[in-house]
């Protein structure tokens, strides 16, 4: 009894060079990556700036966007003109720019109908004493504009300690920056709209400073947001599962597999990233056992049935709410 069209879908990751990137995606995760500073692995993405191709199985060679457009049954026939999520691994050797993302309404109006960007970070590894920027201290637009104008970054930015296993939700309007020495799994809306507030006065490949987007940033910052003091996870772990975030765009869970773990898959689809350990996974309706390990990402389509994991692994999963 097997239905290969309901089997798990393994996208080929896409790698992006970034001036702040490093080599950990090869050295730590074993991906084959291009030369140079590679900052991002787009692991599950149908975004036009990085549309993953399916590696094997019934859909081998198809772009994820094609599966979305032509085989919506794999996604539970949910509505929408694009696959809504994007799962990345970020290797920050140096600091990322201080940035902020718009919400859906602002992005639709000012960015050609793009989605806004809500994102969240699960910290995979961090050098000792690493911090991240999350939130800012200005109370209104005028105060923020003055802080930016005068370069008062220490007054403006909220820094929080960051270590492996921490989790940070980044709402639209939240000023943020990943700092050097951090390896992160990011789950986000399928959007690439970023407004740079400050870039440490760095220059790009062309010798010029990268563009900043001060007006847009002032427009979209949420001045009422209370910045968090820590990324420690406080949600309880129930039967190996910890809910990390539930928001209008996605639900993200951490799942521990210790021996055998059966996960129901009643959702339109489920994105799964193995962030530690190794083992196997089988979807009940397909009946094929796949070897998986740290750095494997896959989509469990609608109707694939229960997922049976064997081994010793930690997963991060994401789905629609
Ligand atoms: Zn961001």
Image (cartoon, rainbow, N blue to C red):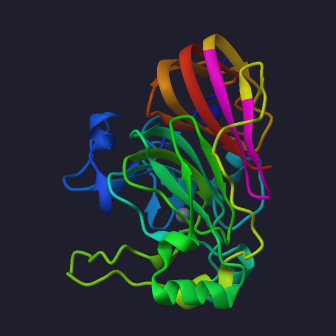
* Residue at figure coordinates x 61%, y 12% from the top left: 258
- State whether residue 251 appears in this view: yes
Q: Is residue 47 above or below residue 152?
A: above
Judge left or right: residue 5 versus residue 277.
right
Q: Check the picture and name the quadrant holding the N terminus.
A: top right
| Residue 241 picture location, percent across and down | 73, 26
Could you tell me which residue is drawn at 55 percent across and 84 percent down?
A: 147
Of 229 and 73, the residue lying toward us:
229
The chief SS type of the magenta part is strand
Q: Is residue 111 visible?
A: no
**Residue under the point 28% across and 50% down:** 22
Q: Position of residue 34 (x, y in %)?
A: 23, 51
Residue 245 appears at what percent x and percent y?
A: 74, 46
Q: How many marks?
A: 0
Seen from this angle, which residue lies furthest top?
259
Query: Was residue 149 drawn as part of the magenta stretch in this picture?
Result: no
In-front residue for pair 79/234: 234
Ligand 1, image quadrant it occupies:
bottom right
The residue segment tinted magenta is 242-257
**Can you say whether 125 is above or below 287 in the image?**
below
Q: Is residue 163 above or below residue 85?
A: above
In the rendered image, residue 125, in percent from the top left (x then y), is placed at 44, 37
- Residue 49 sits above or below residue 38 on the image: below
Q: Quadrant of residue 307?
A: top right
Q: Is residue 246 magenta?
A: yes
């Amino acid at each position: 009894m097997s239905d290969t069209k309901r089997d798990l879908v393994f996208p080929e990751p896409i790698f992006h060079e970034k001036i702040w990137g490093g080599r950990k995606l090869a050295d730590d995760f074993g991906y084959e990556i291009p030369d140079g500073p590679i900052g991002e692995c787009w692991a599950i993405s149908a975004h036009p700036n990085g549309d993953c191709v399916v590696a094997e199985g019934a859909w081998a060679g198809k772009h994820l966007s094609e599966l979305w457009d032509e085989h919506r049954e794999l996604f539970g026939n949910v509505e929408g003109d694009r696959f809504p999520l994007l799962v990345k691994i970020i290797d920050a050797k140096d600091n990322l720019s201080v940035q902020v993302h718009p919400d859906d309404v602002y992005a639709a109006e000012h960015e050609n109908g793009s989605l806004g960007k809500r994102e969240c970070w699960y910290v995979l590894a961090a050098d000792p004493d690493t911090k991240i920027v999350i939130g800012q201290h200005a109370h209104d637009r005028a105060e923020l504009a003055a802080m930016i104008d005068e370069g008062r970054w220490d007054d403006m930015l909220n820094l929080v300690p960051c270590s492996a296993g921490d989790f940070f939700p980044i709402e639209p309007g939240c000023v943020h920056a990943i700092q050097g020495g951090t390896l992160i799994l990011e789950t986000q809306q399928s959007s690439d709209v970023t407004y740079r507030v400050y870039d440490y006065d760095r220059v790009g490949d062309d010798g010029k400073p990268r563009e900043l987007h001060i007006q847009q940033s002032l427009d979209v910052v949420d001045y009422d947001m209370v910045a968090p003091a820590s990324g420690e996870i406080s949600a309880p772990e129930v039967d190996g599962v910890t809910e990390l975030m539930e928001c209008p765009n996605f639900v993200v869970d951490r799942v521990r597999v210790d021996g055998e773990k059966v996960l129901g898959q009643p959702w339109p689809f489920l994105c799964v990233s193995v962030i530690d350990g190794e083992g196997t996974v089988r979807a009940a309706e397909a009946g094929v056992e796949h070897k998986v390990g740290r750095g494997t990402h896959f989509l469990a389509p609608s109707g694939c049935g229960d997922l049976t994991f064997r081994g010793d692994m930690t997963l991060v999963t994401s789905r629609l709410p």
